[in-house]
Amino acid sequence: MNRDANNKSEIGCAETRSASRSSDALRTSAHPITTVSLFNTIYRLLDQWLYLLLLVVVTLPAMIWLQQTGSLTLYFSPSTPPGQLLYVLSKLAGMYALLFIALQIIVSLAGRLKPALVYRLRLLHPLLGTFVVLLALAHALLFFTAVSVRQGDPAWGLLFPGFRDFYHTHLTLGVFGLWILIAVVISGIARFINRSSAARMLHRGYWASITLVYIHALAVGTESQSRLGLALYSTLGGVVLMMLVMWLIRRNRRVAVAS
């Protein structure tokens, strides 16, 4: 009798625990999806496919560029206009500069949304920043050299603001974006050395830089006229915007809780 009673008691306890777990599961499933849980889900997916995703993303600009430029041997033909090879190389550098600017901001926002990532991503920040500056300068110098070779004189006018038509206006936006980007890098170095609050504020100019560069690329970048190029730029812009909105929502909730 005691053994049967004990068995019934154990069965009853097991049923109680099972019911409790079922109730917890129901409460969990009924809980609305929050911004943090959504980001955690996205992060787990990205963590599983991170290297494959990065490989695809980094390869896409080169694929789009090759699709538009064709074989490079064509640019060594005597019938090809002078400076054309430098021009198409400047396009490739510009596409990768925009890609790494977007990746830089995505990495920065990822660290803010999930503090556990800060340690893993902290070395990527200066590395991506170096890539961005080198690629942006290569884009500007290659384009400047290509135009100079084409017209037979240094194209100094490209380095200064000009708003006489649509094309030159958006070239000017790209120049402004480059100037701001250089200031952002300098301020980042200054902030690392002496933790200056002014340098920290100036370093936030990367938002202005990526906005100007993004408009510049969409307006005058021939790669943005193709479906694949437009899809790439739209995806980068969408991901950055989504993560920015998620970070703003999370920050506002923290402010509301603190107050």
Image (cartoon, rainbow, N blue to C red):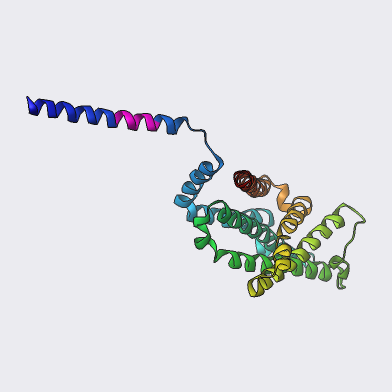
Magenta highlight: main SS: helix
Identity of the residue furthest to the right in this view:
164
Residue 76 showing in the rendered view: no
Q: Which residues are magenta?
A: 18-25
Please tell me which residue lies in front, 154 or 49.
49
Q: Position of residue 128 (x, y in %)?
A: 61, 64
User: The N terminus is located in which quarter?
Assistant: top left
Residue 27 showing in the rendered view: yes
Identity of the residue furthest to the bottom in this view:
193
Please tell me which residue lies in front, 245 or 226.
245
Specify the quadrant of the image occupied by residue 197. bottom right
Taking the spot 22% from the left edge, 27% from the top edge, the residue there is 12
Question: Is residue 21 one of those drawn in magenta?
Answer: yes
Specify the quadrant of the image occupied by residue 76. bottom right
Number of labels in the image equals 0
Please tell me which residue lies in front, 32 or 234.
32
Question: Is residue 16 one of those drawn in magenta?
Answer: no
Please tell me which residue lies in front, 103 or 246.
246
